[in-house]
Image (tube, helix red, strand yellow):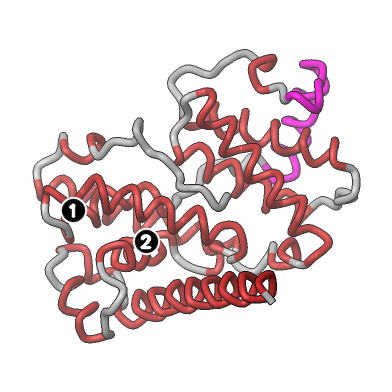
Amino acid sequence: MEGKIRIEEHSLAPLQHYDSASEDEYVSILIEREKGTLAFKNIESFIFVNCFSHSRMNALNWILQTRATLGFSFQTAYLSMAYFDRFLSKCSIDSGKCWKMRLLSIACLTLAAKMEESEVPVLTEFQSEDYCFENKVIQRMELLVLSTLEWNMVMITPLVFLPYFITKLCNESQTCHVLSKTIQIIFTLIQEVNLMDHRPSVIAAAATLVAMDQHLTVESVKLKMSSIHEFRFLVAEDIFAYYDQIQSFYIEKENYKTQEKESYTQ
């Protein structure tokens, strides 16, 4: 996951078909619906402890690699990781049994693809080089995930807000670069940070601002966000707090890399 995530197929098109008023109305609906996402707050923090973190990282890597191979959107990848985390918060799996974790990864990705993609490949396309599962085994795991999550598979994610925030906050010439960088930030964070602890709109706004400028103050965040019509639904202090958390995370990560590099040279 250290390499840069590429986003060639990702597009800002979904929101470009609306006029400004319709766009604002659409985002206000998303913000209202995202309240349901907070029902999952704090429920899967335990999966970030050491016994699960390695298995979770392997799952994320496989999902991202398979997403690229099959041409899925990053929305599908994000949603599949959300299913993965929510499932493990409710149902115990021995993290040492790698084949079970891979089967769960496949089931979560196939379910997310059915929710998000217009064309979903047959189950054999989801097989990996190291494991090969029969279709009926994958289907049984899909049913287990569905029942464990109580068939609640619709989730608002930060990615659905990105076209809105980026087009509102960026110059048109910067949109593709900022979009790529923002997605990179979100999928870097998902490795180690429980994104369910924050509203998707706050994550999207904060990550976009970090991608644009890493030296903002709370006042400058307020100023930038005040230009957005739907800002009345958001709290600038919440956005800045998460913006600051992202910054701290990156500083800590860079310091760790520096210390690791120095230990090798000694």
| Element class at badge 2 | helix
Residue bounds of the magenta highlight: 129-150
Of labels 1 and 2, the one closer to you: 2
Q: Which residue is the site of mark 1?
A: 24
| Element class at badge 1 | helix
In this image, 242 relative to 192: left or right?
left
What amino acid does circle 2 point to?
A: Ser
In this image, 9 relative to 141: left or right?
left
What amino acid does circle 1 point to?
A: Asp
Q: Nearer the viewer, residue 253 or 182?
A: 253
Q: Which residue is the site of mark 2?
A: 201
Q: Is residue 136 magenta?
A: yes
In this image, 12 relative to 159: left or right?
left
The answer for how far apart the CA atoms under marks 1 and 2 are is: 13 Å
Other-residue count near label 2 (Cα within 10 Å), few / some / many at <14 / 14–19 / ≥20? many
Residue that sits furthest to the front in the current view: 266
Which quadrant would residue 243 be assigned to in this image?
bottom left
Tell me what residue is drawn at x 23 percent, y 51 percent: 164
Tell me what residue is drawn at x 63 percent, y 43 percent: 61
Q: Is residue 143 magenta?
A: yes
